[in-house]
């Protein structure tokens, strides 16, 4: 019988997916319901905002932004 | 079907059958739904069936469609079934036949051919109004009220309130509604716009009116109003004539209460709260038509019909990301400043620059690059419109890249369907979901699919189970 699972489909590239899985691993698997393929995962609907926030933080730590030239 | 009425359609589809049946008692409602909510194909089907005496076998219906039109047919039928306009029946030989709901058919015939004393298309006032107002006045009134609402949302976010009187005088009711609809949020006594609010502001006026009215509808029961009453009144407004005064004596208590709120939005005009007549404004009469209400540029210049047919653009963008906007409207300046670093303001011109900082700030607030681009494109200065595309491609690409840096993931809420027993079961459901337009993602190897709406899918699954395969 077919089953329907409520959740949020998150589409991202493989590198971001690795980070998301990493966040999930470190937080007792409370975000991800299922990993579908290289670029898609299913996340608990209520946790999406928090997961995005954590991803932002992680990116800020890991990626160095080049100074933007903002001259007028 | 325009983009603006599609959200109204989405709302209508979710109503229960009883509400639909009640709604369809009014010819004006039926006509409005028929005119602007249904896809064209669904209209043809309804028209064909309107004067049929008996049920219409589905085999005959299939004969009307080319094999490659199956997808469109399914879509049209599913809309009609959701709205409880047609009823699919199965007889003892398992032949499916369709029939229009009696109430709907009756009202539609009445609306098309006239007759009856339903009075659902509004009753013009019989007394001559000594201070009758002109269409120009009504347009001006509608524009002022609506712009105030928009400015309340945008202005307070970018910190322009206090510098001017506009945006201050919108009613408490309207403010509460904007909060309830999650268009703005109030933190520490300061109003700031939300993601939904952004989408709202950048929509065309007609779509904005519907968005606000749908929030209003959802909160109608809390205010002690009946949803059906409210809806049929809105549909009636859509069929009124601009510049004509209508009497309030035929309205129900709910509708009288509504008049007050609607005049706060600028959808109707009343000389005073006790006035015996009301005038619909352009916002009201375009509710159920495809032609745009007050297009957002005419909102700030003039509302004369001539200016709507040739929208005036005012924004110039150079390849070095500099932006010049020929406007003195505070609302437009406020909208621009949501995603632009504005530096100078002249009497008829503001200038600034699109920077990474200003775009990412907008993205953080929930505005998307495509929204920014479509706003800039639709308001491009005539001089820019000579180029193809209107905006410099480098600028368009850069805006998208800036957004992508901030937003690395794309999310869709919905349902994952899994554990299909057979390949054919999977294929069948995938093609059905595709024809409905709810399929977001599929993986044939793992037999998985993701849909953003499930109501009709589960109905379909239920039916298939009953058929026993």
Image (cartoon, coloured by chain):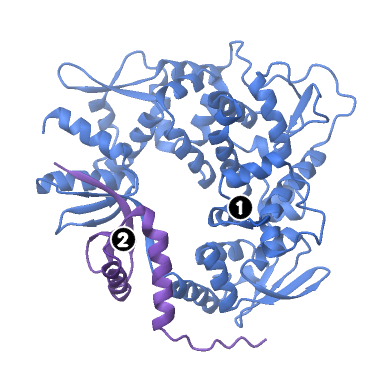
Chain colours: A purple, B blue
Q: Tell me the mark number nearer the camera, choosing from 2 and 1.
A: 2
Q: Bin the neighbour count of mark 1 within 10 Å (Cα to Cα): few under 14, some 14-19, many 20 and up.
A: many
Instruction: Residue at 58% x, 69% y: name it.
Output: B390
Find residue B326 and report its image quarter. Answer: bottom right
User: Do we see residue B384 in this rendering?
Assistant: yes
Position of residue B50 in the picture relative to residue B421 (left or right): right
Most extreme residue toward the top is: B117
Q: Residue at x 27, y 52 (%)?
A: B450
Q: Quadrant of the C terminus of chain B?
A: top left
* 2 and 1 marks in contact (CB < 8 Å): no
- The front one of B401 and B163 is B163
Label 2: element kind:
loop
Quarter holding residue B322: bottom right
Neighbor class of circle 2 (other Cα within 10 Å; few <14, some 14-19, many 20+) is: many
Q: Chain of mark 1?
A: B
Seen at 61% across and 79% down, the residue is B321
Q: Is residue B289 left or right of residue A64?
A: right
Q: Could you tell me which chain the residue with mark 2 belongs to?
A: A
Relative to the observer, which residue lies in front, B315 or A31? Answer: A31
Q: Is residue B160 left or right of residue B374?
A: right
Disc number at residue B139? none
Q: Residue at x 55, y 19 (%)?
A: B26
Q: Position of residue A20 (x, y in %)?
A: 31, 69
Query: How far across and down, in percent of the image, does residue B434 sit?
Result: 28, 48
Q: Is residue B203 above or below residue A3?
A: below
Is B344 rendered above or below residue B42? below
**Distance from Cα at disc 2 to Cα at disc 1:** 28 Å
The tag on residue A31 is 2
Find residue B465 and report its horizontal and vertical position in percent.
16, 32
Q: Secondary structure at mark 1?
A: strand
What residue would you read off at disc 1? B184
């Amino acid at each position: 019988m077919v089953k329907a699972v409520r959740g949020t489909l998150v589409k991202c590239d493989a590198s971001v997916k690795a980070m998301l899985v990493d966040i999930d691993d470190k937080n007792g698997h409370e975000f991800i319901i299922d990993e579908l393929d290289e670029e898609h995962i299913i996340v608990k609907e209520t946790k999406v905002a928090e997961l995005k926030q954590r991803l932002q933080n992680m990116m800020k730590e890991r990626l160095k932004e080049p100074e933007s030239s903002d001259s007028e | 079907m325009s983009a603006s009425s599609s959200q109204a359609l989405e709302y209508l589809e979710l109503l229960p059958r009883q509400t639909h049946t009640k709604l369809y008692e009014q010819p004006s409602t039926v006509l409005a739904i028929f005119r602007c909510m249904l896809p064209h194909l669904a209209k043809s089907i309804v028209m064909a069936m309107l004067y049929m005496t008996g049920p219409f076998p589905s085999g005959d219906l299939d004969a009307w469609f080319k094999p490659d039109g199956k997808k469109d047919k399914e879509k049209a039928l599913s809309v009609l079934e959701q709205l409880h306009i047609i009823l699919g029946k199965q007889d003892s030989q398992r032949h499916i036949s369709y029939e229009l709901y009696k109430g709907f058919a009756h009202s539609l015939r009445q609306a098309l051919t006239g007759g009856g004393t339903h009075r659902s298309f509004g009753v013009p006032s019989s007394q001559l109004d000594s201070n009758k107002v002109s269409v120009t006045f009504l347009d001006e009134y509608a524009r002022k009220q609506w712009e105030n609402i928009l400015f309340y949302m945008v202005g307070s976010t970018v910190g322009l309130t206090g510098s001017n009187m506009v945006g201050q005088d919108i009613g408490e009711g309207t403010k509460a509604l904007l909060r309830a609809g999650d268009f703005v949020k109030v933190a520490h006594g300061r109003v700031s716009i939300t993601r939904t609010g952004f989408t709202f502001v950048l929509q065309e006026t007609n779509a904005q009116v519907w968005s606000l009215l749908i929030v209003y509808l959802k909160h109608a029961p809390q205010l002690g109003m009946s949803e059906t009453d409210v809806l049929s009144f809105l549909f009636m407004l859509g069929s009124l004539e601009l510049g004509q005064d209508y009497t309030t004596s035929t309205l129900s208590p709910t509708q009288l209460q509504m008049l007050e709120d609607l005049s706060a939005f600028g959808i109707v005009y009343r000389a005073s709260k006790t006035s015996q007549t009301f005038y619909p404004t352009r916002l009201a009469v375009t509710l159920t038509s495809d032609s745009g209400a007050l297009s957002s540029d005419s909102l700030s210049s003039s509302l004369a019909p001539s200016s709507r047919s040739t929208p005036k653009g005012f924004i110039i963008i150079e390849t070095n990301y500099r932006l010049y906007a020929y406007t003195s409207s505070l609302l437009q300046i406020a909208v621009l400043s949501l995603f632009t670093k504005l530096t100078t303001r002249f009497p008829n011109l503001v200038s600034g620059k699109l920077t990474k900082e200003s775009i990412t700030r907008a993205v953080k607030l929930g505005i998307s690059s495509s929204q920014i681009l479509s706003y800039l494109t639709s308001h491009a200065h005539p001089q820019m419109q000579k180029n193809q595309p209107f905006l410099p491609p480098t600028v368009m690409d850069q805006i998208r890249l800036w957004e992508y840096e901030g937003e690395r993931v794309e999310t869709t809420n919905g349902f994952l369907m899994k554990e299909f027993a057979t390949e054919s079961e999977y294929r069948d459901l995938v093609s059905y979901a595709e024809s409905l337009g709810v399929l977001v993602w599929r993986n044939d190897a793992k037999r998985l699919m993701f849909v953003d709406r499930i109501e009709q899918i589960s109905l379909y699954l239920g039916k298939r189970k009953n058929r026993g395969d």
